[in-house]
């Protein structure tokens, strides 16, 4: 589904999107995207049972929530639509919505979207990829990628950030959270019992910041926290950026 600037549903059109910086061909079913969707389609209900459909102290620390709260303050309520991009079961979507933001969750997995809709009535959830979002140019006043770039190879981040820049309004804010490293790939064979190999990327915060800047997005804050939770084996990175007024 796709909306125009007035919020009306329009038909999806050609898969080539005009970026501010260069043309981006939105090929959504490259191998890593197809694998991510297949894994989460197969495991959506089990995944939601494990991590829950709300943010919690089992998976978020106070600093994590502080960055989300700062994002809410920066965007401001009643300012327009905010996207939780790669929303999964809608954990961050619900957090933002509960604090007064008009929020839409976007995910490539239809099964995950079904779980999110069942858990969070009254919140919009739509299908889309980080590299091919179902919005017109400048449609969002803010966007959150809460651990959703972890399946994007480093050499595809430029495409993703160009797409984020396309859908953000001038002055719009972006929050990224991800597992930090040096860009190394960590693969799991037979992920969640699906038979697929699912790869996570521990992105370098400096590389992410440089790639954001190359896409025209200005980093305003970034930090690392050391691993504190049982499931964490690497530092956690948080980056706030803004799409400058043009």
Image (cartoon, grey):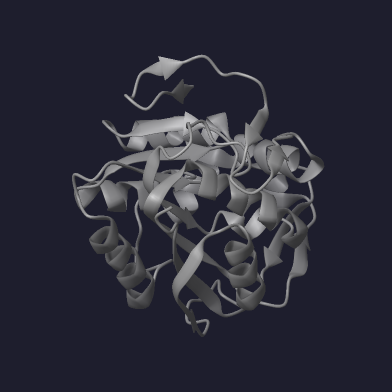
The answer to which image quadrant residue 174 occupies is: bottom left
Give how far across and how far down residue 232 sits, in percent. 56, 75
Q: Is residue 29 visible?
A: yes
At horizontal 62% and vertical 68% (from top left) the residue drawn is 208
At horizontal 66% and vertical 38% (from top left) the residue drawn is 37
Give how far across and how far down residue 233 sits, in percent. 61, 78
The answer to which image quadrant residue 240 occupies is: bottom left
The answer to which image quadrant residue 115 occupies is: top left
| Extreme residue in the bottom direction | 226
Horizontal relation, residue 48 to residue 99: left or right: right
Horizontal relation, residue 134 to residue 194: left or right: left
Q: Is residue 53 visible?
A: no
Q: Is residue 206 above or below residue 174?
A: below
Q: How many marks?
A: 0
Give how far across and how far down residue 100 sits, in percent. 19, 48
Horizontal relation, residue 231 to residue 240: left or right: right
**33 or 136, nearer to the observer:** 136
Give how far across and how far down residue 6 sits, in percent. 32, 24
Q: Is residue 8 above or below residue 161?
A: above
**45 or 180, nearer to the observer:** 180
At horizontal 48% and vertical 57% (from top left) the residue drawn is 146
At horizontal 40% and vertical 37% (from top left) the residue drawn is 139
């Amino acid at each position: 589904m796709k909306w125009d600037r007035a919020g009306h549903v329009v038909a999806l059109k050609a898969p080539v999107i005009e970026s501010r910086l260069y043309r981006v061909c939105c090929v959504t079913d490259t191998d890593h995207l197809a694998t991510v969707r297949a894994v989460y389609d197969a495991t959506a209900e089990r995944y939601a049972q494990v991590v829950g459909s709300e943010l919690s102290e089992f998976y978020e620390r106070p600093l994590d929530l502080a960055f989300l709260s700062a994002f809410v303050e920066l965007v401001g309520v009643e300012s327009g639509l905010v996207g939780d991009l790669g929303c999964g079961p809608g954990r961050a979507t619900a957090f933002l919505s509960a604090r007064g933001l008009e929020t839409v969750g976007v995910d490539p997995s239809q099964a995950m979207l079904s779980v999110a809709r069942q858990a969070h009535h009254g919140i919009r959830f739509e299908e889309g990829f980080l590299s091919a979002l179902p919005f017109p140019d400048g449609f969002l006043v803010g966007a959150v990628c809460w651990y959703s770039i972890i399946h994007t190879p480093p050499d595809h981040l430029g495409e993703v950030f160009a797409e984020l820049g396309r859908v953000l309004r001038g002055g719009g804010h972006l929050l990224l959270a991800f597992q930090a490293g040096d860009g190394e790939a960590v693969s799991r064979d037979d992920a969640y019992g699906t038979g697929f190999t699912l790869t996570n990327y521990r992105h370098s915060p400096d590389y992410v910041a440089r790639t954001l800047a190359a896409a025209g997005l200005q980093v305003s804050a970034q930090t690392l926290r050391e691993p504190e939770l049982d499931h964490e084996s690497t530092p956690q990175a948080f980056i706030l950026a803004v799409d400058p007024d043009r």
